[in-house]
Image (spheres, rainbow, N blue to C red):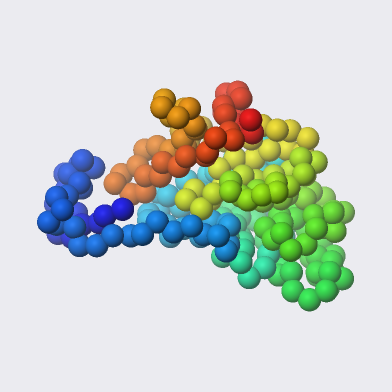
Amino acid sequence: MPFISHVTFHRAAAPIDVIASSAEIMGAVPCLRRGLCRLPLTILESEKEWRARIARLRHAMRSLGCPVDGRLRFAVVSDDATGPFASELSNCLAWDRSECSIVFAFGSLASVRSTLAAISPDVIIATTASLPLEELRGLGKKLVAIEHIDAMPRPPHRVDRLLVCDELSIIAAARAGEDAYRFDRRTLLVEVEPQSGRLAVTTPGFTLFALVRYCLGSGFAVVGPGQIGHV
């Protein structure tokens, strides 16, 4: 993924002008696989991208029956690897005046359960895989699991789920017992790549940054208007 000099970039009149000759390339950003965290940790390039992430979170939580309107209390159960993503969730929820606490899964399970009982959350979002989901059930009115696009095994379908990936953070949401994930068609465009038949998710309305075009892989298909699912 080459990048060009600042001078060339600022002189660009349109996205196509950002394509540079090999002589102007100053360096390259290597492709990295985040095998350790398996959760989003992507640097935001613009305020517009940040607002799009917040919009996707709002849409996802509404799909799960948890409107982000400041009336619900959230708790995110995290660990060292998923802490940055938990922090992003907390910031997005705080943007809409929702109370959100981050509980790190350190120490005994009894300690985690005691902390959650003291917070008394309406919604628990489990970003860590170090605790069994069943151990968190009943500590809040609703339990939501994070499902990374590359992670296996997937959480059981009897739990509400947020589908996420590194480049886009939250993609979509699915209720317990449902196979289809609902995505926000205002902030994401889902297309079928004609050669491979795989789904591609794109952030529309970009202005140089930050366009993301992300292939979901061979395990997903469009299953309805605004819905994708496993195949």
Q: Quadrant of residue 218?
A: top right
Q: Position of residue 159 (x, y in %)?
A: 77, 44
* Residue occupying image coordinates x 61% and y 66%: 81
Image spot of residue 213 (x, y percent): 41, 41
On screen, 29 above or below 172?
A: below
Quarter-wise, where is residue 214 in the image?
top left
Which residue lies at the image location 84% right of the left edge and 54% below the top edge? 134
Residue 191 in the figure: left or right of residue 181: left
- How many callouts does the rendering have? 0
Left or right of 226, for residue 143 = right
- Extreme top residue here? 224
* Observer-nearest of 145 and 118: 145
Foreground residue among 79 and 92: 79
Residue drawn where x is 82% and y is 61% of the image: 120
Q: Nearer the viewer, residue 119 or 163?
A: 163
Position of the C terminus, as image quadrant, is: top right
Relative height, residue 79 to residue 126 (above, below): below
Is residue 179 in view from this perspective? yes
**Which residue is located at x 60 percent, y 23 percent?**
224
User: In the picture provided, is 87 more to the left or to the right than 108?
Assistant: left
Whether 182 is drawn above or below 69: the answer is above
Work out which residue is located at the far bottom of the displayed protein and give it. 107
Q: Quadrant of residue 44?
A: bottom left
Q: Is residue 87 visible?
A: no
Q: Residue 23: where, in percent of width, then height?
A: 12, 56
Q: Nearer the viewer, residue 167 or 154?
A: 154
Query: Residue 91, percent across and down?
Result: 56, 60
